Image (cartoon, rainbow, N blue to C red):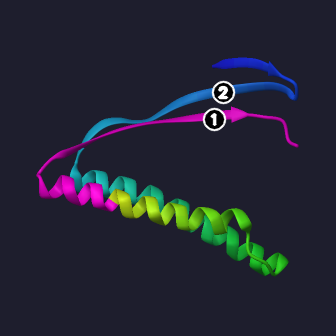
Amino acid sequence: MKTSKSSTGIKKTEKLNLFEDQFMSHEAREILINIYQSKIQYYKLKNYSSQVQFEKDDSQAQKRIPMLNGELKKLKDILADAQAKNQNVVIHSDISISLVDKK
């Protein structure tokens, strides 16, 4: 773990390995599409909650949903190409998590 001081306090960053593996195209499709669909559903629920509580859309959700849908389309195209060519898919994915002070 890296630790460094910033003007707002202590910042800590942790890097976690999510994937470092090779998958058959249908396996990669199942895994990755589920991740994207979960994120899209999260933002849809966040937006719905904002509509119910505050009678307005959540601006972050309104930006993220179309972006994630675009990425999901690209992902489906890539995986369809891999399946058509009978290729496996190698996935490398790290997650960096930083702790920062609230504004």
The residue singled out by tag 1 in the image is: 97
Give the class, few, some or many, for how many residues have Cα within 10 Å of label 1's Cα (few <14, many ≥20): few
Q: Amino acid at mark 2?
A: Thr
Q: Quadrant of residue 26?
A: bottom left
Comes first in the chain, label 1 or label 2: 2
| Badge 2 element | strand
Q: Determine whether, in the image, residue 40 is placed left or right of residue 88.
A: right
Q: Taking 29 as reference, is 52 above or below it?
A: below
90 inside magenta stretch: yes
Q: Residue at x 66, y 27 (%)?
A: 13
Q: Are marks 1 and 2 in contact (CB under 8 Å)?
A: yes
The part of the image, by quadrant, that contains residue 4 is top right
Residue range (magenta): 76-103
Q: Looking at the picture, how far across and down is residue 21, in whole percent?
A: 30, 36
Secondary structure under tag 1 reads strand
Query: Label 1 to label 2, Cα distance in Å?
Result: 5 Å
Decide if residue 19 is on the left or right side of residue 21: right
Q: Amino acid at mark 1?
A: Ile
For the point 63% across and 35% down, the residue is 97
Q: Nearer the viewer, residue 66 or 86?
A: 66
- Residue 96, given in percent of the width and then of the height, sits at 58, 34
In which quadrant will I find the N terminus?
top right
Query: What is the number of the mark on residue 13?
Result: 2
Q: Is residue 88 above or below residue 92?
A: below
Q: In which quadrant will I find the C terminus?
A: top right
Taking the image as shown, residue 101 lies to the left or right of residue 65, namely right
